[in-house]
Amino acid sequence: MERKLIVTSSPHIKTPESVQSVMIDVLVALFPAALAGVIFFGWPALLTMVLCTVSAMVAEALVLREKNIFGDGSAAVTGLLLAMVLPPAVPWWISVLGGAIAIIIGKQVFGGIGNNIFNPALVARAILLASWAGHLTYWVRPVDLTTAATPLELGADAFSFTNLFVGAIPGSLGETSAFALILGAAWLFYKGHIDWRIPGGYIGTVFVMGLLFEGFGSPMAMVSAGLFHVLAGGVLLGALFMATDMVTSPVTARGRLIFGIGCGVMTMLVRLYGAFPEGVTFAILLMNALTPLIDNLTLPTKYGEVAK
């Protein structure tokens, strides 16, 4: 009797990795930035991270009716990422409410992990910003926690590149230290959870647009303008940890590069011409919405179909 070889659609490669192991790797990668936030902004930053993370985990456990609040770890990652994009001295109830919004509206409404269209942490930040803009734009200086403006509000001459790289500047508690973010992202690159296309396209586009649109005078001044836009604000956090979310970003190699470039263009358009000094949140959410289209346009040519 003749036997037919029937091959179903990919993936065919099996791996010992699980959702939980990937999420633990992300938490490990976020640790340097979280530690930098505590060092520069003190206990208010730690409280914000704890409240956001616990709120997100409890919300998911209640929705799924699970006793283990850590679960697969995705809620903890969402909560910590939300904390990273909040001001360090934000009121406690904003943190608690934000964690619940991220899970319920940003994730579970769409069917849970793997089904959400938008990055849940950024959905929560956008809702909080639209509802309580005053609390989401209240910045403090590192160490003394006195009120201050961010580098994007003051301009490139307000802070040295050393402070921008180390993180001794006002801003969201997890976005100020470029060094800590790069250190954490190196772990994700090493583990193979992200590749260069999204962060490379994102950061490269921001650098080039900053150089072209705000770089005047000598070549060094032009490079400084591009570098300022990369180090100031949430570009590194967004490019390395938010835009690279496996659920809400394209699956194809070309698609990921297009996605990263699109995020960079939208971020700079908001920074240069928008009402807000920062555009990372809106840029990534918009590109999340375009992810299905990008995937459809960049899928490789099909040479057959699944056997029925």
Image (cartoon, rainbow, N blue to C red):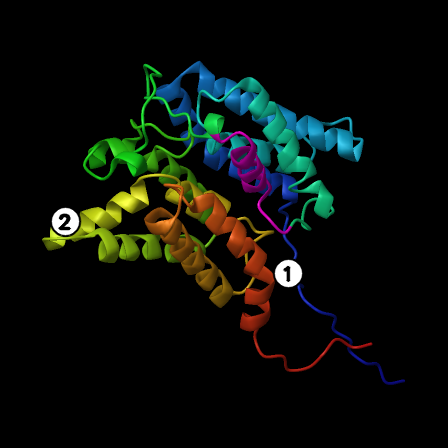
Residue furthest out toward the front: 275
Q: Position of residue 189 (x, y in %)?
A: 44, 48
Of residues 21 and 131, which is closer to you in this image? 131
**Residue 230 lies in magenta, yes or no?**
no
- Residue 264 x %, y %: 39, 54
Whole-Å distance between the Cαs marked 1 and 2? 49 Å
The quadrant of the rendering that contains the C terminus is bottom right
**Which amino acid type is shown beneath numbered disc 1?**
Ile
Please name whichever residue, 66 or 142, is drawn nearer the observer in this view of the structure.
142
Task: Kindly state the secondary structure of the residue where label 1 is placed.
Answer: loop
Q: Amino acid at mark 2?
A: Ala
- With 131 as the anchor, is 260 left or right in this view? left
The answer to whether 58 appears left or right of 66 in the picture is left
Q: Is residue 73 visible?
A: no
Q: Which residue is mark 1?
A: 13
Residue at point 41%, 25% (across, down): 138
Q: What stretch of residues is rendered in magenta?
A: 117-133
Position of residue 115 relative to residue 83, above or below, is below
User: Where, quadrant-wise, is the N terminus in this rendering?
Assistant: bottom right
Q: Where is residue 9 drawn, in percent x and y? A: 71, 69
**Which of the pair 62/217 is nearer the observer?**
217
Residue 221: which disc?
2
Q: Is residue 61 left or right of residue 30?
A: right
Q: Residue at x 56, y 75 (%)?
A: 300
Q: Residues within 10 Å of mark 1 (few under 14, many from 20)?
A: few
Q: Could you say whether the residue bearing mark 2 is in a helix, strand or loop?
A: helix
Q: Residues within 10 Å of mark 2 (few under 14, many from 20)?
A: some
Image coordinates of residue 291 in percent, x first then y, are 57, 60
Which one is earlier in the sequence, the residue at label 1 or at label 2?
A: 1
Residue lying at 21% horizontally and 37% vertically, measured from the top left? 161
* Residue 38 seen in this snapshot: yes
